[in-house]
Every structure is written in C-alpha cells, then in structure tokens.
Amino acid sequence: MDFAMIFFILVGALSVGAAVGVVTSKIAVHSALFLLVHFATLAILYVTLNAQFLAAAQVIIYAGGIVILILFVIMLIGSGPMETRAAYRSWVPYAGLALGILMLAGVSLTLLQTPAAPIDPEANQGGVPIVVGLTLYSQNILLVQLAAILLLVALIGALLLARRPKPEESSTSNLRS
Amino acid sequence: MDWFELIVIPTIRSLVLIVVLLTGFAYLTWYERKLLARFHVRYGPNRAGPFGLLQPVADAVKAVFKEEVIPNHVDKAVYLLAPALALIPALIIWAVIPIGKGFPAVADVPIGFLWILAVAGIESYGVILAGWSSNNNYSLLGALRSSAQMISYELPLGLFLISILLLAGDFSLVNLVEAPRAWWEWIWLWIMFPLFFICILAETNRSPFDLPETENELVAGFQTEYGGIKFALFFMAEYINMITTSAIMATLFFGGYRLPFGIGGEIMPWLGPFILAGKVVVLLFLFIWVRASLGRPRYDQLMRFSWKTLLPISLGYMIITALLVVFFK
C-alpha cells in the first residue's frame, strides 16, 4: 500500500464519519458542522484527483456559502435539541435506509459493468482552471447561460417574495437583506 | 517525490512562517497602541523595556496564566472549537502568498487566487460559532451581525478580485507579481484600491466596521464569554488577519515583493521578504489611522452601503475592466 492509498483511506473514512455525524447528531448546529467537515474532506479528495478548480469551487460555494447560510437560518429561527416529526413516523428511517441501499446498489452495479479503461489524459487534466474554463465557455456555453437564467429567475422570485405590498417604502425595510 | 520533500520541508516552512506571523502579531499590538497613543497625544506603553518593547511579552504571559474559565451554559465542544476556527484561516491563507523570488510560498499552486477566495469564505465560522455556542443574547447578536456583514461585503470583494483576475489573466499569484503591467493598468487598479480597502475593513471586522463587538451596545459581542488565552486567540485572529490582508493587498496592488520600476529585486532576491514586510507595515498604518479617525456607522447604514453603493460600483467596475481588457490588451 503506497502513501496515496493510505491518505485516501484516512480522508475517505473521515468523510464518511462526518456524513454519519450529520444525520445522527441531535443538535442542528452540530449537524451543520459535520456537513462542513464532510465538504472539506471531499475537497481534499478532489485535490488528490488533480481537480484543483473543483476543490476550490467546492470550498467557496459549499463551505463558504451554503453552510454559513444554514447556520444563519438556524440562529435566526433558534435551535433547541431537535424533536423531529420523523421520530413519530417510525417508517421514515427505514424508507431512507432502503433508498440508500438502492442507490449504493445502482452505483456499484454501474461501476462493475463498465470495463476498466485507461484514463484519458485529457480528462485527468479536468480540474485545472484553464481546461475547465475553455470547456465551459465553448462547448457548454448554452448550459452556462441556462443556469444563469435559472439564477436570475430565482433572484426575481426572491425579490417578489420580499417586497411589501405597501407602495411607500419605509427606511427600515432596507434592513431585511 | 519522496516523503521528505512532501512532508518535512513544507512543515519546516510552515513553522517558520507561523513563528514569524505570531511575532508579527505581538508587535502589531505594540505598534497599534503606540500609534493610537500618538493620535491621542499620549505616550502609550512605555514601562516594559525600552519604548515599551517588552509589553507584548508581558501581555502574552498574562493571557497564558489566566484561569481557564468555561461557563456552564455553553455548548462546550463548539465553544472550544470556535477560537481555533477563527485563527486557522488567517494562518493558512499564507500558503499561497509569494514572499520573494527564490523564496517560494509554502505551496505555489495554480489556483492561488481561488485559495484566497475559499479561505476568505470560511473565515467567518469562528465568529459565528463563538456567538452561537456562548448561549448568550449579546454574543448571538454579534454573531448574526458578523455573518450578515461578512456575507454582504464578500460580494463586492469577490467582484473586485474578479476584476483583478481579468487584468492578470492568471490564477497564480507568483505570475501576478512577476508579469509586467501597462501604466493604465496600475492606475485603473489604484482607482479601485480605496473601495477594496473598505471591503477588507469589513471582512476583518476592523473599526469602523467592528459592529460584531461594539462594546457600547453588545458588551463585547461574540467574544463576551471568552477569557484568558481563548480571548487571546480571537485577538490574534483579528490581528493576523490584518497582517494577512495587508500582504494580499500589497501583492495585488503594489507589486508584492518587488520594488517599483524593478530596482534592486533582480540583484538581491533575498530582499524580497523585507520589501513585502515594509509594504505590509505601511498598509497596517492605514488600518490604525482609520481606526483612530473614524466613528462607527449604524448597522443599517453599514448594510445599505454594501448593497446599494459598493455592489453596483463593483459590478460596473468589473464590466469596464472586461471591456478594457478586450480592447487594449
């Protein structure tokens, strides 16, 4: 077993452990922190796969944006120990378990059926910023623009939801951002 | 590449960097107190050693030997984790900052720019978690203010960084420093510098944007429940952040470890770290000058300034930069 393999096993175990922590911890903020650890270890794994851009994007978007928003919301609405509804509906955990096993089976079936082909050197370069940029803005430009329109729609929707029906704007309404 | 090159050398480099930064932090507190005293027409620390130079040592000893108090009502794990989470980003951002020709940073990765953005993104965790885990209304208010403020000012900051990136055309910070720039590029960059500096002040929670810890409304904000060495860690995080952001600004706007017009640097490459340090000291003076001169705005003024003034300006700046790059470069 070489160095890279040991590293992968260590980081992977940490990642899986954090993922388990997300669903098992009783306090919402702890779950969010485990999620943060999970995202960070995923980013490390991306770096080992030579996908630096993906790793940086993972940290910027998920760790720097989404988990902070989750924490923000938890702090705004308050968080005691969670008394989830799911605890009363006893079938929910089993349904989740079954779905998880199904998904694992699907993924491993696909992996086993695909013959082990030599890795394309072009694809192995996939995480370097220049390659990502060139691919995104030449081949996939339509998808990028579609995503942009989707985000714009979400933005306008949020504006509509946040707008008050009153025509005159009071100065304090600027606070809600 | 064997384990020696992979582990031992980066470890030694990181240790040297950390020792230098911690010493820098200690003397930054002395520098700030001395300067503030001069602004107030006082003497400042002058009892411990000549010119009060031993004052940081005395402060450090005091912080270390204070009793370790952990209040009963806190979430203990997160409470102890928060100061570390505040300090770590301030240190690891140095991994990519070029400190001199022939003195490579700990890691000269092709995504240096993105690393700065990523670490800036996780910088707010320490403050948010400290406020939440303290289980105290003042702390929580400070944490909420801090997260809202940091998220708001990250947007114009990111857009300004994108503009610099457009001009540089490269993610690597070493190339950014080494690449020649046309005169109009420098001027265009410097026009933006005051706005960038405002964003940096907000990101580092420095006065006049120190609303997360306003002592006259929120006791001490997110750090109310912290004492002794744990408080010192937050203090350290804030000051090392000042040094770090000064180094980033020196790298992005003022040529990093190079002298203007390419003097000297080629002949004596070992001067690089000292030139960078000199630029950092000048920029730190700016931080302290602002603190001594300006009052704190109200919270809604702070948020409105970010969303209604800085964000549109930064968007416009980015568009014009893109046009300039397309037509003149």
Image (cartoon, rainbow, N blue to C red):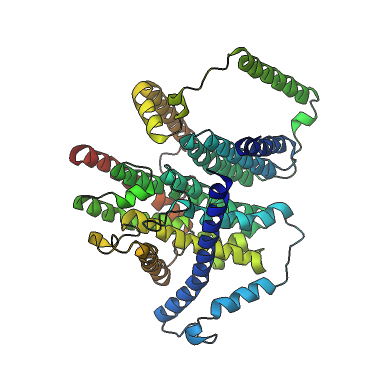
Q: Is residue A10 left or right of residue B29?
A: right
Q: Is residue B244 left or right of residue B166?
A: right
Q: Residue furthest top?
A: A113
Residue B136 location (% of width, % of height) = 67, 58
- Quadrant holding the C terminus of chain B: top left
Residue A23 seen from this side: yes
In the rendered image, the vertical position of residue B43 relative to residue B67, given as above or below = below
Residue closer to the observer: B22 or A173: B22
Residue B226 location (% of width, % of height) = 66, 64
Quarter of the figure with residue B41 = bottom left
Which residue: 66% across, 46% down? A78
Q: How many marks?
A: 0
Quarter of the figure with residue A27 = top right
Which residue: 79% across, 31% down? A87
Residue closer to the observer: B235 or B178: B178
In the rendered image, the vertical position of residue B31 relative to residue A52, given as above or below = below
Residue closer to the observer: B210 or A130: A130
In the rendered image, the vertical position of residue B97 relative to residue A28, given as above or below = below
Which residue: 25% across, 59% down? B262
Residue B166 location (% of width, % of height) = 31, 42
Residue B155 seen from this side: no
